Image (cartoon, rainbow, N blue to C red):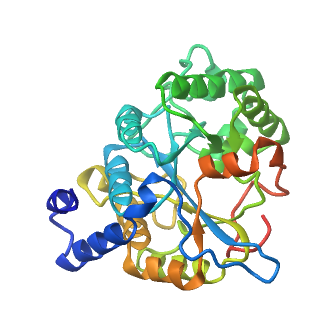
Amino acid sequence: MIEEHTSRRRVLATAGRRTVALTVACIAVGFLGGTVPISGETDAKGERIEIAIRCDDIGMSHSVNMAARELIAAGVPFSASVMFACPWYLEAVEILRANSQIGVGVHLTLNSEWEYYKWGPVAGALAVPSLVDTNGHFHASETEFAAANVNIDEVRVELRAQVERAMATGLRVDYLDYHMLTAVSTPELRAIVEELAAEYGLGLSRYFGESSVSIWDAKPEAKLTSLLTHVRSAHPGLNLLVIHLGMETPEMQALVDLNNEADPYRVGIHRQAELDAVTSAAFRRAIDDAGINFVTYRELIEERGLDSMAPPPNLTSYSSRLGESN
């Protein structure tokens, strides 16, 4: 099975990268049935260091879905935040249905941030007119969303429609989180998200005391270094790594990020670099050396229960390093 997977890896991948992926996959076969502690090390108070990897934007495109398959094949446990408003969510559903060990979340979506690749509301543009532009697509940025004076009831309708679509797939849905953080950008919006989580019995990402970081702002050539720095600085307790996977394919190369004036044209390069980093042997060694345990949101909810959730003080950004409050 591993050999079959290797044969399907992209022609652009080097022989060395294929070897790394195979090595990681072999080491991590035991993870495929769920989280297994790597070393179970604890601090002086008996608290383990845990890392939850949350992969955002699953279902956004075929290239993102194929990157998720690469991560699954590498045996790294993670939670998949799926954009059920996007055209490729059905493929993501099939991948996740075949890999029930992956925690599944609804990546609540109120933006469509690429220049030419667009999507709109699950509820339909006529049902939620304040949430869309003149073409019926979601607003491109949080700033545009805020300037549109959106109807709060329409937000509730749309986010519920996204959760309902997720439930209708038959997947076991575990949690909610927030694309570009727009769905929790005001107290009123945040209240809607919390209301939906309670209504559907779902967890909320970053409501379990996680210290959270993303490596998206790092340059492609610095992604691995940034990732390893975060791992080595992880404190006892729960640490969240937010990853944006993808593959450097023509599909991804065509995307232009309207929210990144400094580097809008290298989306595929950025996302490939994050995939390479999280499937690298160096990442695995850092995890082993630090005695870190992987955990998914599904396992976290099973272990702690939904009653353990508490609103974090700040949901509008990510910290610069693990262990910092956010």
Can residue 75 be seen by looking at this rendering? no
Residue drawn at (34%, 36%), measured in percent from left and top?
91
Q: How far across and down, in percent of the image, does residue 250 sit?
A: 24, 53
Left or right position of 204 against 241 = right
Residue at the far top in the pictured view: 126
Q: Nearer the viewer, residue 18 or 85?
A: 18
Question: In which quadrant of the rendered image does the C terminus lie?
Answer: bottom right
Residue drawn at (27%, 70%), measured in percent from left and top?
22
Residue drawn at (53%, 34%), measured in percent from left and top?
172
Q: Find residue 295 and report its image quarter.
A: bottom right
Badge count: 0
Q: Nearer the viewer, residue 120 or 315?
A: 315
Residue drawn at (46%, 66%), measured in percent from left and top?
263
Q: How far across and down, in percent of the image, does residue 186 sit?
A: 80, 43
Q: How far across and down, in percent of the image, does residue 44 sit?
A: 80, 83
Q: Nearer the viewer, residue 120 or 240?
A: 240
Question: In which quadrant of the rendered image does the N terminus lie?
Answer: bottom left
Q: How far across and down, in percent of the image, does residue 131 sit?
A: 63, 28
State whether residue 37 is above or below residue 69.
Answer: below
Q: Find residue 31 and report its image quarter.
A: bottom left
State whether residue 288 is above or below residue 18.
Answer: below
Q: Nearer the viewer, residue 135 or 157?
A: 157
Can residue 201 be seen by looking at this rendering? yes
State whether residue 93 is above or below residue 3.
Answer: above
